Amino acid sequence: MNCLIVGHMTVMSEDMRNKAEELKGKTKEKVGDWTDNESMQAEGMADQAKAKVKQGAKNVKDAAKDAIDDDDDVR
């Protein structure tokens, strides 16, 4: 499950937060394109890069955890 609803608050998974940040960046970049706003374009590109780095770090963390779990199963 990607999110958990607690009362009125929704707790999103890391994957969903990263994807939302990436989409926000794409939106900013497109708005910057349409309005010839180089600052907004750059901000959007930075948001996308930040989200991709976060997702990459999460993937490495998950892979390390899986490797440790697999090693524990072998013992």
Image (tube, helix red, strand yellow):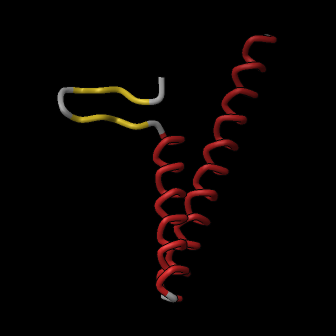
**What percent of the width, then of the height, locates residue 72?**
73, 16
Q: Residue at x 70, y 44 (%)?
A: 60
**What percent of the width, then of the height, locates residue 46?**
56, 73
- Where is residue 65, by image quadrant? top right
Vertical position of residue 58 compared to residue 65: above or below: below
Vertical position of residue 17 compared to residue 3: above or below: below
- In the image, is 74 to the left or to the right of 54? right
Residue 31 or residue 53, whichever sits in front: 31
Q: Residue at x 61, y 44 (%)?
A: 58
Residue 6 or residue 26, whichever sits in front: 26
Q: How many marks overall?
A: 0
- Where is residue 50, by image quadrant? bottom right
**What percent of the width, then of the height, locates residue 52?**
63, 57
- In the image, is 15 to the left or to the right of 3? right
Q: Residue at x 49, y 65 (%)?
A: 27
Vertical position of residue 38 compared to residue 8: above or below: below
